[in-house]
Amino acid sequence: MNRRPRFYLATLVAAALVLTGCSTDPLAEQYREGSSKGFIAGDGSWTEIPAADRGDPVSWSGADENGSPLASADYAGKVVVVNFWYASCAPCRAEAPALQKLNEEFAGTDAHWVGVNVRDQAANATAFNESFGITYPSVMDVDTGSMQLAFSGSIPPNAVPTTLVLDRSGRVAARILGAVSEPSILETLVRDAIAEDS
């Protein structure tokens, strides 16, 4: 039996899904419907850490999908939202539009978004950004794992996506384990961090 037609059909279907973006994203839809498909993720629970109980500032650095350097020093005195993700992660795909919308809403404020891609090479991350309209940079962490190591005390293994809010000192002020299913919660956590005295 000739398998070539099936291969070409699968390739065309995959290309069509990429071109149509998140409106017909089967992985995101499976996640929204509650089908885990063997995926392990956090439950969306969130924690806000009182300033007196926060750990030390987290120092981090890496290169984004374009090869440009990014480091915690670039965001000194700013609130930073750090989102750990990868392209084939269903809840990551489901939350991507909300994260981008919040990124746009906070443009021009003291809050900045940075992604951390834990599994993909730059080409896959760039394709994801184009598909979902993501405009903030992501540190590519698959080869070094340095970002995951830097935040190892704040992120349990396999809890992707995870979103952290860093205060102006670079300390973890809040954490959402799993997909950001209620963007208003993340918005409140970010606004709380912005409102704090540095």
Image (cartoon, rainbow, N blue to C red):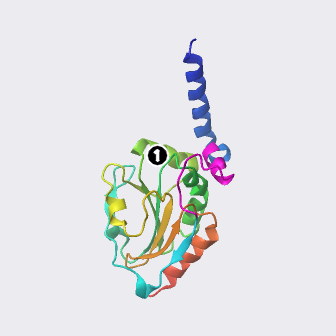
- Magenta stretch: residue 39 in it? yes
Give the x, y percent position of residue 57: 34, 76
Q: Is residue 89 left or right of residue 80?
A: right
Residue 190 in view here: no
Q: Secondary structure at mark 1?
A: helix
Write down the region rendered in magenta. Answer: 26-43
Q: Residue at the spot x=35%, y=60% of the render? A: 147
Q: How many marks?
A: 1
Mark 1 packing: few (<14 Cα in 10 Å), some, or many (20+)? some
Q: Is residue 91 left or right of residue 115?
A: right
Q: Residue at the spot x=55%, y=76% of the render? A: 189
Which of the 4 quarters of the picture holds residue 152?
bottom left
Q: Is residue 23 left or right of residue 44?
A: right
The relative height of residue 55 versus residue 157 in the rendered view (above or below) is below
Give the x, y percent position of residue 19: 60, 38
Q: Residue at the spot x=43%, y=64% of the render? A: 156
